[in-house]
Image: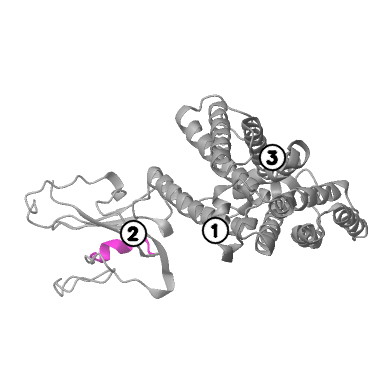
Amino acid sequence: MPPIFSCRNSLMTTNISFPDFDCYKVAPVSFSSPCACPLLPSSCKPLPLPRSSLKFNRLHFVLHGQKGLLRINKRCDLARRHIVAVAHAEPDRIDGKEPEEEVEGGQQSSFQEDPIPISEHQHKKNQLKKRIVFGLGIGITGGIIVLAGGWVFTVAVAACIFVGAREYFELVRSRGITAGMAPPPRYVSRICSVICAFMPILSFYFGQLDVAITFSAFILAITLLLQRGSPRFAQLSSAIFGLFYCGYLPCFWVKLRCGLAVPALNTEIGAGWPFLLGGQAHWTVGLVATLISMSSIIAADTFAFLGGKAFGKTPLTNISPKKTWEGTIMGLGGCIATSVILSKILCWPSSMVSAIAFGFLNFLGSVFGDLTESMIKRDAGVKDSGTLIPGHGGLLDRVDSYIFSGALAHSYIKAFMPLYGV
């Protein structure tokens, strides 16, 4: 067949009847615009496009030799018809290549107007790259904040709590959850988020939260009961759980890092720590325990992810279908191994059994914190809690493994390690 050149563009069609097409000859158009070709003889009259009857539609032009044809797709109404203008051109072959065959109705074009979509493999590769880059950035920044301690660590925790609380209440207000319960009003959600953000500051300054958490729950209950309309128990329960989940539990990280101020005298790194950065007194049991705990959680997440990708076959729970028993076991091994190795490097805790138990508790807190947030997201019908961190989702998606771990680590050290394991 002769060569076919086709152009697909969004052009204008006219609302004229069938007999009118015999009165005109279709003028070839350029691929960039629907203007008439200047090389046509003056006897060739182009098809006029009345301004009063212009409509946008998809128009297909196929230049096909010298003979002129005009095809109308009969499957659509006249105002939305596809017009195929065909004109023969010589020679039959161009550059010695065989021409492409014309598709019936002119629906397929040799020139593609739409860009080739990014493959799923390339998309996953880009997401993994973002995840690694931002994960390293968060890890380095978090390590510096942990080493700084004091008000720097406390304010950073307070900022994370505020953002996490906002994400939590947005999940509570999502359609998947509101279909079965009444969410708390927005002003109550904002008040609760502010209260949660002040909790680590009060914990650092006063050393305890018993009075603060009780008073905060009382204020929330009064606010909900005095609202306009009919207060619902679901509103109170979701607000109180947010106060506990987003505010009270993360405060144990402040207690762990800043409250356990006993010096870790056996730590060789502390012995050579610069005086300008606090000297040996800066390396407390709280600092060492926080570093080991956070590092163990990172190792648990990493090993669980890699183990699930490589060996995962048995689903762990319906809450998170992608989690498997194989990945969970790998995460447990990586968490305990990291805890034991760091305990040898930092010389804390002094007992191997204590190091293994500490790593096991960190793993339990990591897994159940992750599953708790997955349950909330599952009921909300969303994949991520937000879009704050590229490649990771929201802040809750990144710190869900730490919410319960801080409380377990602090309670274990205070209750079961004599002299804090020194």
- Alpha-carbon distance for marks 2 and 1? 55 Å
Residue under circle 2? 59
- Residue 127 left/right relative to 66: right
Q: Nearer the viewer, mark 2 or mark 1?
A: 1
Q: Secondary structure at mark 3?
A: helix
Residue 17 in magenta? Answer: yes
Residue under circle 3? 421
Residue 20 in magenta? Answer: yes
Q: Quadrant of residue 120?
A: top left
Q: Are marks 2 and 3 in contact (CB under 8 Å)?
A: no
Residue under circle 1? 141
Q: Are marks 3 and 1 in contact (CB under 8 Å)?
A: no
Q: What amino acid is labelled 1 in the image?
A: Thr
| Camera-nearest residue between 252 and 125 | 252
Q: Earlier in the sequence, mark 2 or mark 1?
A: 2
Q: What amino acid is labelled 2 in the image?
A: Leu
- Classed neighbour count for the residue bearing mark 1: other residues with Cα under 10 Å, few (<14), some (14–19), many (≥20): few
Q: What amino acid is labelled 3 in the image?
A: Gly
- Residue 344 left/right relative to 38: right
Q: Which residues are magenta?
A: 16-26
- Alpha-carbon distance for marks 2 and 3? 78 Å
